[in-house]
Amino acid sequence: MSGGTPLLTGRGLHKRFGPTPALRGMDLHVDAGEVLAVMGPSGSGKSTLLHCLAGILTPDAGEVTFDGRRVDQLPDRERSRLRRTELGFVFQFGQLVPELPVLENVALPLLLAGRGRRAAVATAFEWLPRLGLDGLGQRLPGELSGGQGQRVAIARALIAGPRLVLADEPTGSLDSVAADDVMELLVTTARAEHVGVVMVTHEPRVAAYADRRVTVRDGRVVQPAAVP
Amino acid sequence: MTISYALLGLLEEADRHGYDLKQSYDRRFGAIRPLRFGQVYRTLAQLQRDGLVAIAGVEAGAGPDRKRYSITAEGVTDLERWLSEPEDPQPQLQTVLFTKVMLALQSGRPAEAFLDHQRERHLAVMRELTMARRGASQSDSMLIDYQLFHIEADLRWIDHAARRLGTLAAELRR
């Protein structure tokens, strides 16, 4: 799993919102194909970290490196290109376009990448059964259960062949049975595609799916206190 | 206690020999701790003394397995009563953790380090169980879920306690 250069590294990350520090010297790395859980209570800086890693936010200090490139120094256009081509995203909710049927939601990253509509939708169609979404292609997001919606989001996150999926509380709004289904599908499908996953969660049950786990508190990664 | 009722339940389904009872028990309930033959025969003897099972037949041959057991009417009544009575929750592990935290605080030892290490252990076991559940049968996976939810409850207590160590220590010093 490890060895060689990590795919994504955050080093000495600081970020504050007004007077409130969210990240205070955060260090973190993810290896290619690794499933990493970032745990911590709410307000510990987990989501800010994820946004900095994705280049959605720029850290006040520190470096984010993706495959040798300094994400924090890339111009906006390059960053959104990186997000489109190398990264996939799964959020807690509200990420699907409500006016578009499932099939087109899944196809969206391919359409944004310039793939023709017919080919994009055909590829999306092939993804549905992999996430147990057979027959739901024409439904609108509002007609899906919470778990189905998250599975659509996972298909969309993976369809364009990213190298890393960033997931923020991917099961946050689900009951435990749906949450287990979603996690199982996220982790097994990502592994089958050799895609790494960084998931931010406060739920131990979700973190238990990861290869590795780090805990964030007060804007830093904490190591467990040493036993004397 | 639970074993007696599990055996009664299996006998309610069908008359069985001791060996068959052990196999059926292990298949259905014994994923974590299979029964020993000694336990089966001891429990059956006790159930027979209490009039809850009876010997339905004895086949020719040697060994304890010649006897075929069946549940009696009293056995069915007792099983029904047991099934319908709610159990008191048993917060056992929590009292161990609680005692360790209190002792650490009282003696000035680092309670936070203890909680951190306990949290790590709990999370590691959750991960092992989650991996074991992959590909498990539906009933095994239900049993693993039962463990997972209990570990999760412990973890909530550990986090809760960790946030209150300061006030707890102050109270103990008073």
Image (tube, helix red, strand yellow):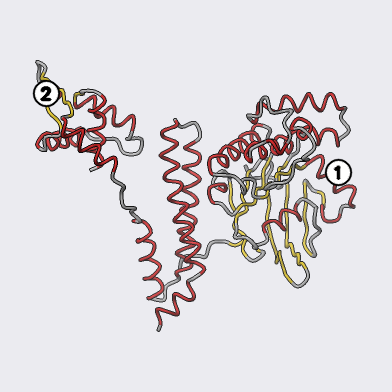
Residue B98, by quadrant, is: bottom left
Q: Which mark is residue B65?
A: none
Given residues A121 and B118, the one toward you in this image is: A121
Q: How many marks?
A: 2
Q: Is residue A207 left or right of residue B68?
A: right
Other residues around mark 1 within 10 Å, as few (<14) / some (14–19) / many (≥20)? few
Residue annotated with mark 1: A81
Query: In the picture shown, does residue A24 fall above or below B129?
Result: below
Measured as percent of width and height from the top left, residue A228 is found at 45, 68
Q: Residue at x 41, y 34 (%)?
A: B140
Q: Which amino acid type is marked by label 2?
A: Gly
Q: Quadrant of residue A18?
A: bottom right
Which residue sits at x=73%, y=49%?
A8
- Which is more toward the observer, A208 or B56? B56
Element class at badge 2 = loop
Which residue is pictured at 20% across the width and 36% down the height? B77
Residue type for callout 1: Arg
Instruction: Label 1, secondary structure: give it.
Output: helix
Query: Outermost residue, bottom direction?
Result: B174
Q: Farthest residue toward the top?
A: B60
Q: Identify the image quadrant of residue B106.
A: bottom left
Residue under the image location 29 percent in, 35 percent down: B34
Q: Quadrant of the C terminus of chain B?
A: bottom left
* Residue annotated with mark 2: B63
Residue B35 rendering spot, x and y as whole percentages: 26, 35
Q: Nearer the viewer, residue B118 or B48?
A: B48
Q: Is residue A37 left or right of residue B65?
A: right
Q: Is residue B117 left or right of residue B61?
A: right
Q: Position of residue B119 (x, y in %)?
A: 48, 57
